[in-house]
Image: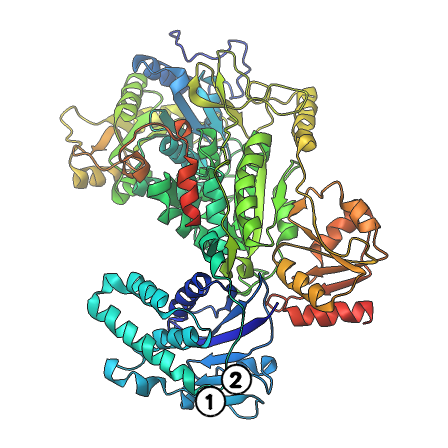
Amino acid sequence: MKSYSVVLSGEAGQGLKTIETLFMKLLRQSGYHAFMTKELMSRVRGGNNTTELRISSGPVYAFTDRIDLLIVLGKKGIRRLEKRLSPDSLVTGESGHLDDTGVPCRKVPLPVQESLADLGGTLYANTLVSGLLCALFSCNPETAYSLISTQFSKKGADIVKNNITAFNRGMKLAKTLPLRAVIEKDTSAEAGSKALSGTEAVGIGALAGGCNFIASYPMSPGTGVLAFMASHADKYGVIAEQAEDELSALNMELGAWYAGARAMVTTSGGGFALMTEALSLAGCIESPAVIHLAQRPGPATGLPTRTEQGDLNLALYAGHGDFPRVIYAPGTLQEGIELARRAFDTADEFQVPVILLTDQYFLDSEGIIPKMDFAHTSIRQHITETAPGYRRYALTPSGISPRGIPGYGKGIVRVDSDEHTEEGLITEDADVRTAMTDKRMKKLAELQDIEPVLTGSRDYDTLVVGWGSTYGAVCEALERQGRKDIAFAHFPQVYPLPKSTKAILSRAKRRILVENNVTGQFGNLIRQELLMDFNARILKYNGMQFSVEELVQKIGEVVQL
Amino acid sequence: MTKTRFDCDPDTDIAWCPGCGNYPLLGILKEALEELDIDPAQLVICSGIGQAAKMPQYVHSNFFNGLHGRAVPVATAVKAVNPSLTVIAEGGDGDMYGEGGNHFIHVIRRNPDITHLVHDNMVYGLTQGQASPTSPRGMKTPVQTGGVTAEPFNPLAAAISIGAPFVARAFTGDAELTKNIIKEAVRYKGYALVDILDPCVSFNKTNTFKWYKEHTYRLPDSWDASDRMKALEKTFEQDMLPLGIFYRRTDMKPVFEEQLPVYASDTSPMWTRSRPPELLAELMK
């Protein structure tokens, strides 16, 4: 697989997003594989943000340190990326932006402002850069023109025309750069593929899971899912409500499930912390609940726009008292869709809260996937028509009681946060208490595990273990190492630990844990539940995701390549 | 007490203290609902935690007895996903004005068609006698040992100011008035607050049944409840507490659930709906 890495560097508010969106679409329609990830400062204007675009001949889903081409649209763009640049890196941008000295790289000035003088200057810089990239990667300009028309048509014909002019000038400027990227395209793949972000994957999965109610309080990086659902509310019949706080959000969700909706919330660690009492309520009243917990580095406000896998412990132990829960953590965009969809089924079938654990890196990254087929996706509602004498918490062998909702049938549906009888009425009877606790705790016995995904050698000595968004980088790192004795076990179902975990881990002579947090929270869970530990822990907690290169190096050090 | 379709199992062990104001209120509520001819299977009472919040335990109807302070978000959501249900949120002054204070502001702003019944006894009962948001200044408690220093919360003034379209005060010692107010509140389309003065016989030795009798009076029949500013002014009378419907907006204020796009062309409850796979296929375009 051949891939090329382009990094765009600019200030917040400068419109990097325009280039990203346009170029990702263009790459997909040109038959490339591509991956895009960005890092942002927590500010609306200024600062320095970067976007990495990887253009590839095969599927790509990881962040790489290497920079083949850096386009700087603002000052101080080079210095911040010093460690990732090499003498092979080509850096271009307005000559005034290239004056960071002492960084070994090839610099070629790009007269952006001069080229756009008659159009009013830098306003169209983004489109010019898109044109530059189009030419460098031999994309079809006609496709780009049509994307530009669609994107800017609302702003009027003049704006469309100016954008196309700027785009053409960018294409022309590409000839001045000493660079030709030769990457295989597969133009037949275009019809069957889709470009999407992690945020969109979660939203699409939720809609496929029948979600028709979302209440949330904005908090990065979870807010995007609320915005996605709100923008699809009319067409898909979703009630999307911005709650006054997270306490309200999850209580609204539980009220919505109680009355027959399929509901979710989206939040981040701090907001989830506020929801924990209602999480415990879901456990007690045996309400389904789907909670999207989008991680960012804590503690407290932490690094609001950065990434970490630091909230697994929070998700595992949040809520007072004992009650069952399920935690899913997608590692790919397909898994994002599938696990978000499945979260609704699991929550509904087993009447438990399901936490979908993602992070900023996963949500803000964009990739290209084969289109998923929903033709056979049926949404099964696990609700029952009630009759007089209905008992919400009827004791059954599975622990799961048929779930009625008010207004469907002649029965009465009582749910109670106090310990309750089968009828849902307050009780302090010690035997009932024991029976109800046992009932709740056995509900997940029939839960079908989502098996760990094994990559690499079937006959491994060394096993790398990870979960969630580290998937792409670990896979690519192992691919580059090309060793026959290493495999990678990725866990999309983090909790309960799949029953096969012990067998998978036991087969390895050496186990390496990879986690984007400081304590190795998943490794600790495995140690606690299976009494199995790791020979090495590769942990990162500076607010950034793992790069392929650093995993190649660190895994290499452990296996002493 | 009149027999109603809302009567619970007669063997139920009711957890209130003897003489509690909640007993007459339970009877009043059930009679009001009976007279409104509501089907218990189509009624949902959402409550939180506290002595008042136990009310639905003793009413034969659907209920969601959730967390302290959080009945209102639950009620809002229940009504939003199935507007054909009659929804009541019920609890005490600590539950609704203290722990749930933020929701109190925002439920008024949203204006769902729910009835908000707040038993106001100016003290914490379940936790045994601490000050509540409506406790009068100077009231001594095991925690406020030198007496309450904070200004008592004025729920009626707050509600009218924020934009509640129906705001009333009742007193369990005036059963007829209380019943009529609850009936009007349930019938009213939009958010309706009824603050119900309700003596706590165990922990509030100041605001007793006798005190309420001596410090309340009915608003006159001639009271014009459509005048918002006059109603607001009336809420500031603190020496003698007026009882009745202070404010009832006569033009229809848009109701939360009816403004949701999901009901623009289809009024069926959310649980009856399905999403065709063709629509899902479009997500992959």
Residue located beneath label 1 in the image? A108
Marks 2/1: CA–CA distance = 7 Å
User: Is the residue under label 1 in contact with that under label 2 (CB below 8 Å)?
Assistant: yes
- The answer to whether residue B69 is visible is no
Tag 1: Cα neighbours inside 10 Å, few (<14), some, or many (≥20)?
some
Give the answer, above or below, for where A165 lies relative to B64. Answer: below
What quarter of the picture does the N terminus of chain A occupy?
A: bottom right
Give the camera-side residue of B237 and A336.
A336
Say left or right for A364 vs B116: right
- Number of the label disc, if any, that sits on residue A90: 2
| Discs 2 and 1 carry the same chain letter | yes
Q: Position of residue A196 (x, y in %)?
A: 47, 56
Mark earlier in primary sequence (2, 1):
2
Q: Where is residue A301 in the image (x, y as percent from the top left)?
A: 53, 62
Give the camera-side residue of A479 and B272.
A479
Which residue is most to the right?
A509
What quarter of the picture does the C terminus of chain A occupy?
A: bottom right
Q: Where is residue A57 in the image (x, y as percent from the top left)?
A: 56, 66
Instruction: Give the amino acid type for the residue marked by disc 2 in the picture.
Output: Leu
Instruction: Give the amino acid type for the residue marked by disc 1 in the picture.
Output: Val
